[in-house]
Image (spheres, rainbow, N blue to C red):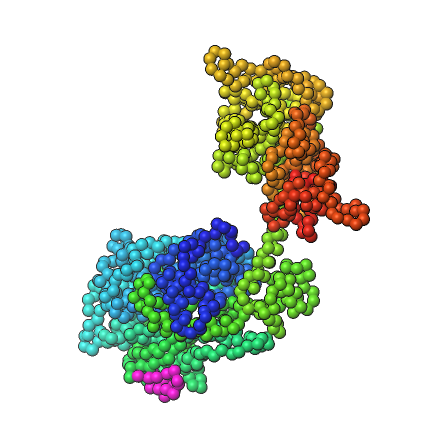
Amino acid sequence: MGSRGHNRYHWQSHNVKQSGVDDMVLLTKINEDAIVENLKKRYLDDFIFTYIGPVLISVNPFKQMPYFGDRVVEMYQGAAQYENPPHIYALADNMYRNMMIDRENQCVIISGESGAGKTVAAKYIMSYISRVSGGGPRVQHVKDIILQSNPLLEAFGNAKTVRNNNSSRFGKYFEIQFSSGGEPDGGKISNFLLEKSRVVMRNPGERSFHIFYQLIEGASGEQKSILGITSLDYYSYLNQSGSYKVDDINDKSDFQETMHAMDVIGIKGEDRTFVLQIVAGVLHLGNISFKEAGNYAAVESEEFLAFPGFLLGIDQMRLKEKLTSRKMDGRWGGKSESIDVTLNVEQACFTRDALSKALHARIFDYLVESINKAMVKDHQELNIGVLDIYGFEIFQKNGFEQFCINFVNEKLQQIFIELTLKAEQEEYVQEGIKWTPIEYFNNKIVCDLIESKVNPPGIMSILDDVCATMHAKGEGADQTMLQKLCVQTNSHEHFNSWNQGFIIHHYAGKVSYDADGFCERNRDVLFNDLIELMQSSEIAFIRALFPENLNADKKGRPTTAGSKIKKQANDLVSTLMKCTPHYIRCIKPNETKKPKDWEESRVKHQVEYLGLKENIRVRRAGYAYRRVFRKFLNRYAILTKESWPTWRGDEKQGVMHLLRSVNMDQDQYQLGRSKVFIKAPESLFLLEETRERKFDGYARAIQRAWRKYLARKKYVQMREEASDLLLNKKERRKHSLNRNFVGDYLGMDDRPELRQFLVKREKIDFADKITKYDRRFKLPQPSIKQTINLILTPKFVYLVGREKVKQGPEKGMVKEVLKRKIEVDKILAVSMSPMQDDFLILHEQEYDSLLECVFKTEFISLLARHFEEKTQRKLPLKFSNTLDLKLKKEGWGPWSAGGSRQVHFIQGQGDVAVLRPSNKMLQVSVGPGLPKNSRPTKKGISQARSYSSRTHHHTPTRAAPGPPGSMISRMNSQYNNQRTPYGNQPHPFLPPTASQLKDRAGSQHQPNTDCLKVPEPGAAGSVQMRKFTLFSHFKRAGRPKPAPKPKPQVPQCRALYAYDAQDTDELSFNADDVIDIIKEDASGWWTGRLRGKQGLFPNNYVTKI
């Protein structure tokens, strides 16, 4: 995990100046001014995220930032927090990984005032988790619901306020539930206190919920006709605040997104229609107005009753009756009776608005329930909670809703204080860690002022008492509440009263609350008459929204809105306290909602009330990481043999053992009574990186074994397919049937001089040194190394030789040249003899090529496959004792005809082909091979497996590199002996032969027919050792010894050339270094020890001593 190497890219890492500090724990001065200045620098340079240790500070940029794409997701996935610049993805990844590592539930608490960017932050967290977690169709369905729930709930629960164009007017705690493997397979939403009063009234310059504007702007012509939709200013509920449009919101396209979200969540088409009917019905209800008729209310224009009645499926006369009268229950002499009371205009308006608010609130609850049903999970395993709740807010007029919203924010601030300031300091004391206490403001005193039940009772308790004695709507109840508040709480240091309400000194500042309507909104009563009315609807969907049993006896006080939000807030706190919390503190830089606009005083105020200075001081003096000993041991047990799989001694000693194993400085950690405390994140990253390396090593070993297994299966299949091409047509060599196919025998990855002739990134299927014969059946000149390279790709056959440069600055140098390039689909046929020789002729339109290739079966099988892929027909294979060879046309004129030659094969003796060239014919004699009907056996694969099981080191998958400054010579018998059937690496590379080494020493080696011998299995070590005796002159450089040197306990070899390690598990050495040989491998990579270090090295760079 972690960094992905040189190609990792980041938006803050290229041509960008350093802006402030990423983590404010590193600030030189710790005061509000320094914090604000650092945030300002970063904000103006478009760096909106900053850390205080693990806490993320996010400043709202009021524009779309460029660093939230797939590329950035990939960069933060699995990376440690400080590997990359601060980002919300780092926090989200940390949450997800901690959940998987510790098997503990996580939560993120996003706090800040209205318009600070909390909802957007929550969206990015859910989006990131959805991207990085795996899963099948069910998981993908849950991910879609998680992402689509946002636009749906925002449509019905968000609105434009004077402080925020997309303000959440409800609270939401979204639990994303995971399987034990980390796939999101369920979820649950808990919603809090929808501000339903916004449906019927709001402050000037604000809007109602987005869905009303979306419906009017985005509905089709047919929908508008059915729902009675006209212009925005037609509806009384919408035209009262004079705000219809929002600059950065497109209501028309958002409507389509809302409808799509309903579809994804699983709301049926018919039910979607009913939801829109209710939304339109609420708008039409608002247009019903009342006039005074003899001190009573009467509907001013009854034509406005028609559309609400039609859309809600109720009788319009019954609707009129319930809006203007109410059934009251009374008791006289132990008997109860009901009487109809006619309402006045004010009461009728209140009843109409109560019905409208109830309809919208119940539709909202229905949508939340639908989302939860679509994600329901039978049992809980792991979860991540995302809290997106309304921010602290202060308006010109603050009512009951603002009081509840600010109370919930007080509770969230209390959690932050409890866990980051109070609990952390108390933990140091309990664990015996040296600590100097840091003072901070604890807002528990404000929470108690609002929610305390007794001694003295809090504001909510007093409000509930007043509501319990209310019998009708009126200003009297609000005044009674104010009087009681003055008596009970006036002496409280965070409370003041004023003529129209009261003032609370919240953690974020003083807020003046207008008491008008407090009691009525707290009662939150929907009269039985209205419930009966909706239960009489013809539409079953609407009836289901009002399931109350009106005949049941009511006992005790009715639940008030205040008591409900208090219970929800406390339940939320207890849920959050059971999780491992993470924090995002959102800051709003201005009130203009414009980018790059920075209001110093506003930001400083937020920095003060969010307690960032105290947070930095505690973090700076404290420890970034703490873990119970047992969990620490479980996490890092793999670091040492003594601790894996379980530390058996004292846990504290085990922790000390692990910390010493990574050489961590003693000033970087302290051991408490039950926990280990680590100071700097970098020290933790050291542990994590060491752990990752250990796991990576084991994972590579498993992958290597699996790949070997697959490769063996593949090679067996390839071998059988190749053998079928020659079955009953050609005799086989003794050891060719069961050998493994390797493909690249040249190590093309390390041969740029050969790759230069290939198409860029062209796949190489076969590469080997072969012999090519000219028209006189002679080999090329000895100075040109006697051999050429045969390379096969899916499209071409390349023949690459070497020639001396005849002119220019490189005159006299020997360089690679492209002898021939043949398109695979232009090959006409391939001819071979029926004997065991290695000759083959490639027939092409222009002229033919006579080649001698030891691994002809492998080459022809691959060539046949590519030929069939290109031409959709089989490659013609011809077998005959006499083969015709068409020559290349040379020169001009009538005497320039290419002509032809013949190759004649006769029965001889031995496995080595004997060549007798004459004028126009080449005679090849070779002894009998295996019968033509011979097939591969399973022996080869089992041998390879048994060999592999005995090998305790791991060889690289790349080929061993060729020695510097030379090409590998023509294969002789020793060279062939290296090509054993045991070689099971994808790209083995062959060691230099005696003939090569002689050539390097300056002797001229003439062509030798020994090159045609068949490879012998298992002779890589012994034969090579005998043939390298000609290098005895290297033995002069022995170590100084006072006495005769005893025979070494292990075999040794001497380096012929210097070699620089290409990977961490390889040895570097200089020429003449003596290396102890621990293990020899047919792949070409041996294991050795030099200067106390053990590793791999290429055997063609050394000679055995």
Question: Can residue 988 be found in the magenta stretch?
Answer: no
- Give the magenta part as a residue range: 481-498
Question: Can residue 483 be found in the magenta stretch?
Answer: yes
Residue at x 33%, y 81% (from the top left corner):
502
Q: Quick check: 971 above or below 389?
A: above
Q: Quick check: 771 above or below 530?
A: above
Residue at x 19%, y 72% (from the top left corner):
291
Q: In the drawing, does residue 417 fall left or right of residue 349?
A: right
* Relative depth, front residue between 285 and 672: 672
Q: Quick check: 404 above or below 742?
A: below
Q: Where in the figure is residue 966, as x and y percent of width and height?
A: 60, 35
> Does residue 752 appear in this view?
yes
**What is the residue that sits farthest to the top in this orientation?**
894
Quarter of the image with the N terminus is bottom right
> Hey, which quadrant is residue 921 in on the image?
top right
Residue at x 79%, y 50% (from the top left corner):
1042
Q: Where in the figure is residue 839, as x and y percent of width and height?
A: 62, 23
> Does residue 469 appear in this view?
no
* Relative depth, front residue between 1094 and 930: 1094
Q: Where in the figure is residue 128, as x and y percent of width and height?
A: 45, 57
Residue at x 63%, y 59% (from the top left corner):
639
* Relative depth, front residue between 163 and 1011: 1011
Q: Quick check: 525 above or below 536?
A: below
